[in-house]
Image (cartoon, rainbow, N blue to C red):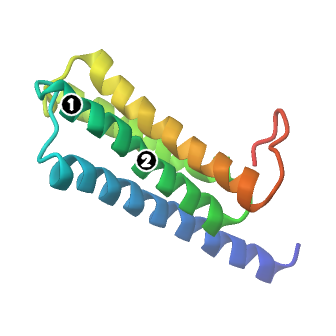
């Protein structure tokens, strides 16, 4: 691979990670703050159900965008996003900035991670048109 192709891929990779993070945080903010007006564990079941469906949808969009921009190895590009989700969930819970029990907050973080992975899968399956092979980190 030539140095210009490597440089181009480095730029695409960096851009994919940054755009994915921005889309994830903007999407979750929009769902939880603008649509449902600050979601908390003590909200009504309908609010939790709606936010529980729409928030991972924001992660799917972010994961799809990461994969589309990176163009190769979409799951590898999701590692920083997933690591930040874990770190943020741990930080918010440890500081008491969220009101739910650990299982609730952990499942919310996990739904974001799974949503991002699903977005990358959808890109690789339907846009690129190939199945990800077993053991492949692409």
Say which residue appears at 48% left-offset and 60% top-offset.
20
Instruction: Bin the neighbour count of mark 2 within 10 Å (Cα to Cα): few under 14, some 14-19, many 20 and up.
Output: many
Vertical placement of 132 versus 41: above or below? below
Q: Nearer the viewer, residue 62 or 125?
A: 125
- Quarter location, residue 103: top left
Measured as percent of width and height from the top left, residue 34 is found at: 17, 55
10 Å crowding of disc 1: few (<14), some (14-19), many (20+): few
Residue 135: percent from left, percent from top: 82, 33
Residue beneath disc 1: 46
Q: Report the disc number at residue 134.
A: none
In this picture, residue 30 sits left or right of residue 11 = left
- Residue 31 in percent (x, y) is at 26, 50
Q: Residue furthest bottom?
A: 4
Instruction: Give the structural element (helix, strand or loop) at label 2.
Output: helix
Q: Position of residue 96 (x, y in %)?
A: 13, 28
Question: Which residue lies at the image location 21% right of the left edge and 30% below the top edge?
Answer: 46
In the displayed structure, 86 sits above or below 27; it is above
Secondary element at tag 1: helix
Q: Nearer the viewer, residue 67 or 85?
A: 67
Residue at the extreme front of the image, as rendered:
46
Among the 4 quarters of the image, the one containing residue 54:
top left
Q: Which quarter of the rendering shows the N terminus?
A: bottom right
The residue that appears at 17% across and 46% down in the rendered structure is 36
Q: Nearer the viewer, residue 126 or 94?
A: 126
Q: Which residue is mark 2?
A: 57
The reply to whether residue 132 is in sight is yes
Which sits earlier in the primary sequence, circle 1 or circle 2?
Answer: 1
Does residue 133 lie above or below 93 as drawn?
A: below
Q: Is residue 59 above or below residue 26?
A: above
113 vs 117, left or right, is left
């Amino acid at each position: 691979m030539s140095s210009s192709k490597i440089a181009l891929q480095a730029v695409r990779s960096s851009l994919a990670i940054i755009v994915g993070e921005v889309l994830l945080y903007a999407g979750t903010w929009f769902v939880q703050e603008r649509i449902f007006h600050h979601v908390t564990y003590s909200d009504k079941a309908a609010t939790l159900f709606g936010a529980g469906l729409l928030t991972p949808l924001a992660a799917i969009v972010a994961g799809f965008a990461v994969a589309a921009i990176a163009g190769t190895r979409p799951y590898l590009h999701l590692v920083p996003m997933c690591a930040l989700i874990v770190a943020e969930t741990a930080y918010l819970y440890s500081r008491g900035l969220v009101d739910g029990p650990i299982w609730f907050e952990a499942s919310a973080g996990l739904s974001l991670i799974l949503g991002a992975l699903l977005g990358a899968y959808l890109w690789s399956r339907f846009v690129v048109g190939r199945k990800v092979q077993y053991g492949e980190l692409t």
